[in-house]
Image (cartoon, rainbow, N blue to C red):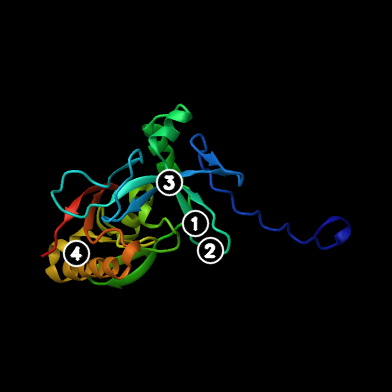
Amino acid sequence: MGLFGKKVDPPPPAPPAAPAFRLECAADIGQGPMPVFPMLMGPAWKPAPGQLARPLIKGPALPDIPNVALVYLIPTPGSPVPSRGYIRQDRVDAIRKTVKDFESEALHNISQRKAAWQVMSSSPAGKVLACTDDYLAAERILDPAFLRLAQAQIGEESLVIGIPARGHLFAAGLSAFTRGAGEARAFATMMEQLCKQAGELGISRWVYTVIGGTINNILEVR
């Protein structure tokens, strides 16, 4: 009740906070600052001279390892899919930054995008989680805090992760893979099929192991 006994409606809920993107390496082409983001690129993609990119993981002597490019996402009128502007070394030099500055800012910015894990399936063998609610969902494999949320939901410190296609990220507990070959083959087969079905949007057919929120290796399932 308010003054004089009159009912007072509660204030409307506050709007959600805007993502706290870092913009020191941003670009502006007249539509406001565009943050830098990492973007996973499938094995068919090759960086042009001067484009910034690195392998997702070093060490495994396996083919078809995706690259991590650095990009600006440019809104496309009438389409939910943005265009992308690949960041080149000359852009880094022009604003007197370093590649490390761009990479650090991109990893921070990906962590600020709205995304959530959903339970895809649950069985005695364990849970399988999926994140498919963001164009850059697959890139959350680079976000240790987001991977630790999956660890908490699944109840395991070690995970297997799939990034078969643009906007798709999957997680399961590693222990299910060590207990029986059936679960491992089912998860690996799903990743391979989704990657193939995605065509040019495919990213990786491999299953990755994550320990403590960090990519550790590739798990070959036979």
Residue projecting furthest to the top: 96
Which numbered disc flags the more N-terminal residue, 4 or 3?
3
- Report which residue position mark 3 lands on: 71
- Residue displayed at 36% across by 41% down: 51
Crowd class of label 2 (few under 14; some 14 to 19; many from 20; radius 10 Å): few
Question: Marks 1 and 4, Cα distance to the nearest angstrom?
Answer: 37 Å
Q: Is residue 149 visible?
A: no
Residue projecting furthest to the left: 222
Question: Marks 2 and 4, Cα distance to the nearest angstrom?
Answer: 40 Å
Task: Give the left or right position of residue 140, taking residue 33 as reference.
Answer: left
The reply to whether callout 2 and callout 3 are in contact (CB within 8 Å) is no
Element class at badge 3: strand
Residue 209 location (% of width, % of height): 22, 53
Quarter occupied by residue 152: bottom left
Residue projecting furthest to the right: 4
* Residue type beneath disc 3: Val
Question: Marks 4 and 3, Cα distance to the nearest angstrom?
Answer: 36 Å
Which numbered disc flags the more N-terminal residue, 3 or 1?
3
Residue 82: give its label: 1
